[in-house]
Amino acid sequence: MTSQLASFKIPVIDNEPMRNYAAGSEERKGLQAAVDKMLKSAPFEVPCVINGKEVKTGDIQSQLMPHDHANPLCTYHAASSEVVNQAIEGALEARQAWEEIPWADKAAIFLKAADLIAGKYRYELMAATMLGQGKNAWQAEIDAAAELCDFLRFSVKYVEELYQQQPPRNSQGVWNRVEFRPLEGFVLAVTPFNFTAIGGNLVGAPAIVGNVLVWKPSPMATYSNYLVHKIFLEAGMPPSVIQFVPGNPPEVVKQCIDHKAFAGLHFTGSTQIFRKLWKDISNNLDIYRGYPRIVGETGGKNFHLYHHSAEIKSGVHQAIRAAFEYSGQKCSALSRCYVPSSLWNNGFKDQLVDETNKITIGPCTEWNHFTGPVIGRPAFEKITSIIEQAKKAGGEVIAGGEWDDSKGYFIKPTVIVTKDPKSVSMTQEIFGPVLTVYVYEDSEFDNMPKLIEDTTEYALTGSIFAQERAALVSAAHKLRNAAGNFYINDKCTGAVVGQQPFGGARASGTNDKSGSIAIFSRFVSMRSIKENFINPQDHYYPSNFL
Ligand code: NAD
């Protein structure tokens, strides 16, 4: 046992300052050099990392570069069932020692990891996110540098606050306390391709409160996630606390969920996979020691609702950023717009079409593009097929609607106008650069919130744009449950850790809000402790006497 001989104060925590990569800047030179170096050395070989040691299974899979799909960024060794087993058992063995490491030392590991990402590894991690996940420089900065640092640092702040939450009352001769125990068993983190930061946070949040984990990364984000894991180790994370286990997703996940020590799932990805995993876990309830914690942030069908008093120009720019940045592959990406006919016919449509047509798409290695490829072949086929279906169903493509997969998976930012507010591209999550607009009569504004609510099962993000306060008030009230992240006169993407806790309800997830104190309570099991200082001298109460 170690002792902590003071109640330490954590450093002041703030958001990581963003770099802008303007032409000629030092940061652009640094990032360019990292991208060039990575391109020269690719493909990298990624092992499983079990108990801090590289394990090469020989079952080789590839992570392709979405802008140049003939070339892999890395190959990786897919975990065999024996390796998954070693990962689970190693993590379980490390559990007690990790729990016993004092809080200040756990915090120090996270603060150091953030500083390594902010400095030494910033450009390398961004380059891996650009080449492997198809982000341009700005999107990579938002994700792999800023958001990941923020997740790690704010985790320290929030856990500090969580640990300070103690019972407010002590009766005479009694001291009441609570402690926040890690879960009994291991946590499985199943992470998505689209944010390197989410990968780091899905393992980081449970780990910082003392849990041990198996990390199953997305095959399409293997290399950046592997670097994040390396950074955790360099920062001093004990080697078996987070086991890096790339592999066949259904197989690795099933083996973990079927283990009797499975204690929690930290998932981000599609609604359909999350629902399946929840059912699989429920079917296993009899084998577990406790009730596993299930935390999942999933799909969305995010909206902008414009009122006739909204400003057109900024409304259009906000829509373009929200719909087309990172080719619409943010869970918060704008997918459906509700625009009143007065605005639509007085400039909204023309500006939206003009500005969308100006956008160039291309590889992340070229600086001038606003956006790049979609992640892979299945995504490319799904997105283009939805555009075709929307056209067949009467949707009018007024911008984009073209694609080319000869070298990379490129789809032009596409705007569809529909007369059917429940048509396919208004209802399904597309996860690509496709925005569908429904033009409504101005007099119908009051009915739009109900239409928005009834159109999809999701409730992730949404925005209202208006200058008239009464319109804002009414829409914000009626759309209270339609989005876990709601914006007023701002785009529906771009949540910042420590500023807008993120997550949606309904089919969009358990809404445990990453980037807030709430998430940590899902990965601890509280113990109440009452200590008595005064020994009773009798077992009777005054009311027992005549
Ligand atoms: P996905 O569901 O395809 O994959 C997510 C994870 O699940 C990956 O690690 C994947 O390998 C694994 N997986 C896939 N099939 C599996 C199976 N049969 N069994 C077990 N595991 C399996 O999602 P994705 O394409 O990586 O990410 C896009 C999705 O994630 C979108 O739906 C998006 O809305 C959602 N997302 C949501 C948030 C949020 O905060 N709400 C954030 C990012 C992404």
Image: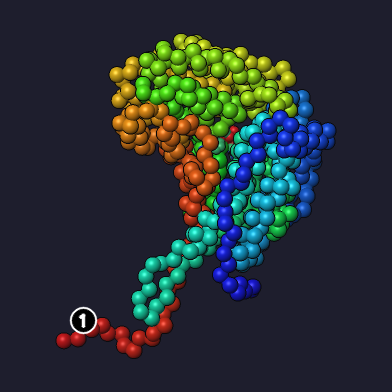
Q: Amino acid at mark 1?
A: Ser
Q: Residue at x 59, y 59 (%)?
A: 11
| Numbered marks: total | 1
Depth check, front residue: 81 or 334: 334
Q: Quadrant of the N terminus?
A: bottom right
182 lies left or right of 236 = left
Residue 385: give x, y in percent of width and height.
Answer: 56, 17
Residue found at x 65% / y 39%: 19
Note whether ligand 1 is within 8 Å of mark 1. no
Toward the bottom, the furthest residue is: 537
Helix, strand or loop status at disc 1? helix
Residue drawn 73% across the image and 40% down it: 123
> In the rendered view, does 305 fall on the left or right side of 374?
left
Query: As displayed, is residue 364 above or below residue 169?
Result: above
> Dot 1, how many residues are within 10 Å of its Cα: few (below 14), some (14-19), or many (20+)?
few
Residue lying at the far right of the rendered structure = 40
Quarter of the rendering occupied by the C terminus: bottom left
Instruction: Look at the picture and state if 59 lies above or below 363.
Output: below
> Residue 256: image x %, image y %?
61, 48
Report ligand 1 position as a quadrant: top right
Q: Of 262 and 244, which appears nearest the observer? A: 244
Residue identifier under label 1: 543
| Residue 150 visible in rendering | yes
**What residue is rendered at 61% in x and 19% in y?**
359
In this view, the residue in front, 326 or 215, is 326
